[in-house]
Image: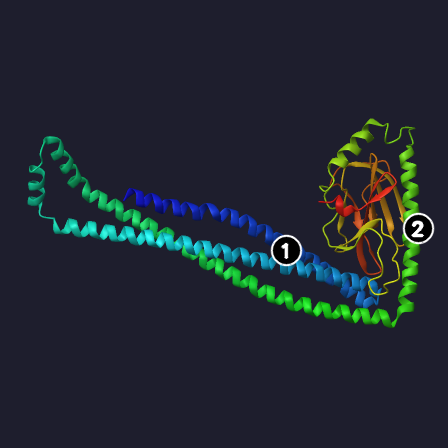
Amino acid sequence: MKKLFSVIICVIACLTVSRPALSQSVNAQKDKKARLEREIAIIDKQLAEASSQSLSKLTELELIRKKIDNRKELLGEADALVRHYDDRIYRAQRQINRLQARVDTLSNHYTRLVRSAYKNRDTRLWYMYILSSENLSQAFRRFGYFRNLSSQMNEDARKIKQAQEELQKEKSAMRELKAEAESVRQERAAELQKLKDEEKSVDAVVRQLNKDKKKYQAQLASKKKQVEALNKELARAVASAMKGSSGKTSKTDPEAVRLSSEFAKNKGKLPWPAAGPVVDHFGERYHPVYKNLKLPPKNGIEIALDPDTEVRAVFEGVVKQIMVQPGYNMCVIVQHGNYFSFYCRLKSTSVKAGDKVSTGQRIGIVDTMNSQTRLHLEIWQGSKPQNPMQWLR
């Protein structure tokens, strides 16, 4: 019987140990889901502004497609979560079945024990059983058995009750899992319908772009000039900073060497300057509708944000310059040894040229320009622009 109780306790322990691991996984998925939903909310606000202000259809198309990407990620997370719940429910049911079988076996054993004790409740039979012992040692053992029988039965009853309570807890937990799984399935169905609606809106924007091709090509030409002017100005600022006002370059200044080394070690680990969806990416690409039209090359990324969002430094360094650039408003340039980070489209700054900044320190507030609230972020290694997505965690 003690062995039987040990088995039950092991089964209960298995159920208890697996639950924290499940909770951590589910919580991680829920956190990611919440982030994706926040990003979609930001995009929805900017789409509403773009629509009301009749802004660039390319901007609208980029926002919708980013929202579709997020929606697909949400669906993927929902699918993974449902599979996780289903697997957990299956394993929990198997454990419950085993535990139920053990409780049934234990209960049957206890019932036979009680019935046997009831049939032999005549104390004269007990005395005769003790007196018929072959020796004194056996008599003491038989006396001890009868003396402990009552307390053993009470203890067994207590253990059965405990096992049954644990069984009921597991059943209750599984009912909660099933309810959560059903809720996720319903949310998934709603997300799928939203995705279909958004894909239809993409088709509408594409038709509009094809209809007014000359108008949107003129917008692109203006945007290209702004991008080229920014790239030229940033390259000039980097060249000036690399020379160093003190005569020391970033390759000979000990502090610059240290910063360069630490910055390089943190590739893929840098904190985001602000939380929001990336709606425009690094590098060269062609227009999504006018397939033979190359878009202005991007040396950084565009992060859509809520109005007045704080922008923070991705790493410690020194503010080298604050400049104003057409189409990008205020830009803060921070040097990290041989590396640089640029933060553009700010409406105000919290730092000035020459200030030392720490990782995560506020450097300014994002601006809303033409009804769009976006941070333009660039990271350079020397005079070579880097893809920020490869550096941010």
Which of the pair 252/44 is nearer the observer?
252
- Give the residue type at disc 2: Ala
* Quadrant for the N terminus in the image: top left
Spatial CA span between label 1 and label 2: 38 Å
Residue 75 placement, left or right of 21: right
Against 213, residue 138 (above or below) is above
The residue positioned 55% from the left and 59% from the top of the image is 82
Rendered image: mark on residue 157: none
Q: In terms of secondary structure, where does tag 1 sit?
A: helix
Mark 1 sits on what residue?
34
Q: Position of residue 181 (x, y in %)?
A: 52, 60
- Give the residue type at disc 1: Ala
Residue 30 placement, left or right of 241: left
Q: Quadrant of residue 350?
A: top right
- Does the rendering let one see residue 228? yes
Rendered image: mark on residue 229: 2
- Does the rendering let one see residue 347? no
Against 183, residue 124 (above or below) is above
Against 15, residue 241 (above or below) is above
Q: Position of residue 173 (x, y in %)?
A: 45, 55
Which of the pair 223/195 is nearer the observer?
195
Q: Position of residue 217 (x, y in %)?
A: 91, 64
The residue positioned 19% from the left and 43% from the top of the image is 149
Q: Residues within 10 Å of mark 2 (few under 14, many from 20)?
A: some
